[in-house]
Every structure is written in C-alpha cells, then in structure tokens.
Image (cartoon, rainbow, N blue to C red):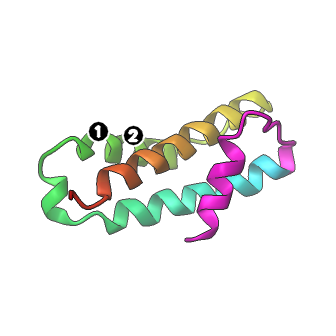
C-alpha cells in the first residue's frame, strides 16, 4: 500500500497530464487502494459518523466504469485519489 502515496502525489500534482495507458494503470492501482481502505475501516466506525459519506463515495467510485474518452478517466482518477486522501484522513487516530 505504500506505493499509493507516490501515486497520490503524482495524480494530485498540478502538472499531471497522463496518457491513456498511464491513466489505466493508475486507475487500477487507486481502485485497489480504495477497496483495501474500505475493507480496513472497523465496523464500529461505519455504523455512524462522518466517514459514512466517504465510504459510500469510495464504493461508488470503485464500481464506476471510466468513460471512453481521455478526460473522463482522468477525472475519475482524480476523484478516486481525493477519496483515498479523505479516507486516510478520517481513519487517522484522534489525538
């Protein structure tokens, strides 16, 4: 899972304009990271709280098929990356 941080840095960078092949690879890896994170959320957190919306968004994005153009998959990839960040933020321990 540590590779996802490098992917997030790349995908969320200002200068990121990937080609189709690169988007396909990153979509696959980011989708996998989202699935792992959703599976790792403890049941007691899922029952109530702000993380519910993020989990629902993650599940929706994981099941979304990318469009046939280049812009649609780039947007999906960015939305997935932002959702990974949101999940990680919600899962961090409260000090």
Residue for point 67% across, 56% down = 7
At a point 47% along the width and 48% down the height, the residue shown is 85
Q: Is residue 30 left or right of residue 70?
A: left
Q: Which dot marks residue 4?
A: none
Q: What residue is pinned by disc 2?
A: 57
Front residue of 94 and 21: 94
Q: Name the quadrant containing residue 40.
A: bottom left
Which residue does the image show at 33% across and 48% down from the upper left? Answer: 55
| Few, some or many residues within 10 Å of mark 1 (<14, 14–19, 20+) | few
Disc 2 and disc 1 in contact, CB within 8 angstroms: yes
Q: Is residue 9 magenta?
A: yes
Give the answer, above or below, for where 41 lies relative to 66: below
Query: Are there few (<14), some (14-19), or many (20+) residues within 10 Å of tag 2?
Result: some
Give the numbered dot on residue 53.
1
Q: Which residues are magenta?
A: 1-21
- Secondary element under disc 2, as helix, strand or loop, is helix
Residue 92 appears left or right of 36: left
Say which quadrant the C terminus sits in. bottom left
27 shown above or below 29: above
Q: Position of residue 34 (x, y in %)?
A: 48, 57
């Amino acid at each position: 899972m540590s590779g996802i941080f490098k992917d997030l840095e790349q995908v969320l960078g200002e200068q990121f304009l990937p080609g189709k092949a690169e988007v396909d690879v990153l979509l696959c890896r980011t989708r996998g990271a989202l699935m792992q994170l959703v599976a790792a959320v403890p049941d007691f957190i899922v029952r109530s709280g702000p993380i519910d919306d993020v989990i629902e968004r993650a599940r929706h994005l994981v099941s979304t098929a990318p469009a046939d153009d280049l812009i649609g998959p780039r947007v999906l990839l960015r939305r997935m990356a932002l959702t990974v960040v949101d999940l990680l933020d919600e899962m961090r321990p409260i000090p």
